[in-house]
Image (tube, helix red, strand yellow):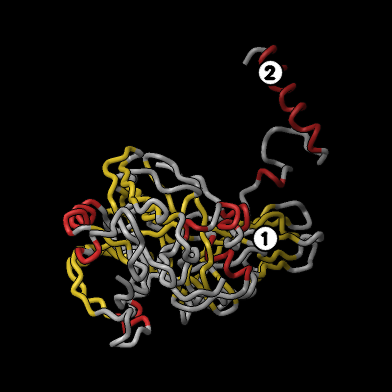
Amino acid sequence: MSHNSRRRNALRCSLLVAPLAVGLTACGGGGNPLAAAPYDAAAKVAFGSAAGGKADPSKPLQVSIKDDGSRITDVTATDAAGRYVRGELSADGLSWHSTGALAAGAHYTVRVSTEDSDGRPGRKVLGFDTTPADAGLHVAFGPDAGTYGVGEPITAELSVPVKDRAARAAVEGNLKVTSSPQAAAGSWYWVDDRTLHYRPSTYWPAHATINVSSTLNGVRVQDGLYGGADKSLTVHTGDRVEALTDAGTHEMTFKRNGKVVRTLPVTTGKPGFSTRNGIKVVLGKESFVRMQSESIGIAAGSSDSYDLPVYWATRVTWSGEYVHAAPWSEGSQGYANVSHGCTGMSTENAHWFFDNVREGDIVQVVNSLGDMMTPFDNGFGDWNLNWSQWKKGSALGDAGQSATSGGGAESVNSTDPARLRPETV
């Protein structure tokens, strides 16, 4: 080595050593405790809840070191997926504890770095499992896989009720919804303690793919309750179909992807039986249904009683409001409202409507004397809440709104036969 090379090497060593201020005199390992291989600190380090077997995930992980001049310099705890557990090291370096929740039924690796009184580094690595949850929280997504209209909300049914707001936030934060190829900013709404609905700020994009999944598996929701593994869901949207019924002009305007396709003469509910105003969503289709007035409390034999075979019936409420064929009222269609709450049209038009709508399509009524469609207790009236009102139903507040890319009513997606009675004609 040349004289100049030796001088440059010596200079580099002195520049590296000086900031350490530990009395080092050379670049080699002799006399530098930081350059030594870490020793096994197993005899000094103690683990709390993880010692001797599986750990209780409801309790923090504790790490401590003997008070003999040694201290803990760093602790990392990761699960099998590489996710870190938050933690806090004491000011004196004698202990560390986790501040983030551990998952149930998970495997963790804990790496502890130490330093003894002479500055020599030590290391201890421990692997442990957390006990599985005895009774997990499970979630079932709806609707069934398939293709729907742009008004179809996503539903989540929980296996156990969740009332605490912090617990709800933990659940909601782990329910993921994405849409592609077009993003659709949306949010969850807590309908009741076991039911959530998800919708965008406006209708879903047409011809989108919507993926729904849960990352609750092993996540602590509240004391003694952890999430379980559940099946994800993929649904698609078709064309944007909107049927607007004006009870004042007695016409339905049928639009597909923003373009008017047909204008149909209709009749809606007469005084005392006025059709509900507001936005409804197609719930199902029945080519034939028998409608009886007794199902809505009209006694047989009264002037308003009926018992009729009805064809091409498209359901828009659970209680029995339909768009259907009403050949008996064709003389009034386009001129007067004479039904008991349903939207009636000719057999030909009802058949065409039946063939051109699917579940999730939009059916809206305006200018009726009836009440507004309720949001949750009689079908999918979700769109009757504006976006500001909708976001108030999230346990995460504004943070619950997601831009995704590539109050106490009973669950609305129940199929209890008692709720599926034909109500009106």
| 260 left or right, relative to 171 | left
Residue at image mark 1: 87
Q: Nearer the viewer, mark 2 or mark 1?
A: 1
Residue 353 appears in the picture as rendered: yes
In what quadrant of the picture does the N terminus appear?
A: top right
In what quadrant of the picture does the C terminus appear?
A: bottom left
The residue lying toward the viewer, choosing from 55 and 4, is 55
Q: Measure the C-alpha gap from mark 2 to mark 1.
A: 47 Å
Residue at image mark 2: 6
Using a 10 Å C-alpha cutoff, classify the residue at mark 2 as few (fewer than 14 neighbours), some (14 to 19) or many (20 or more): few
Rendered location of residue 237, percent (x, y): 32, 49
Name the residue at 33% across, 66% down: 338
What's under tag 1, amino acid-wise?
Gly
Rendered location of residue 33, percent (x, y): 71, 47
The reply to whether the C-beta atoms of the residues labelled 2 and 1 are less than 8 Å apart is no
Q: Which mark is residue 323?
A: none
Residue 138 appears in the picture as rendered: no
Using a 10 Å C-alpha cutoff, classify the residue at mark 1 as few (fewer than 14 neighbours), some (14 to 19) or many (20 or more): some
The residue lying toward the viewer, choosing from 276 and 385, is 276
Rendered location of residue 53, percent (x, y): 52, 77
Rendered location of residue 192, percent (x, y): 52, 73
Name the residue at 19% across, 52% down: 352
Dot 2 lies on which element? helix
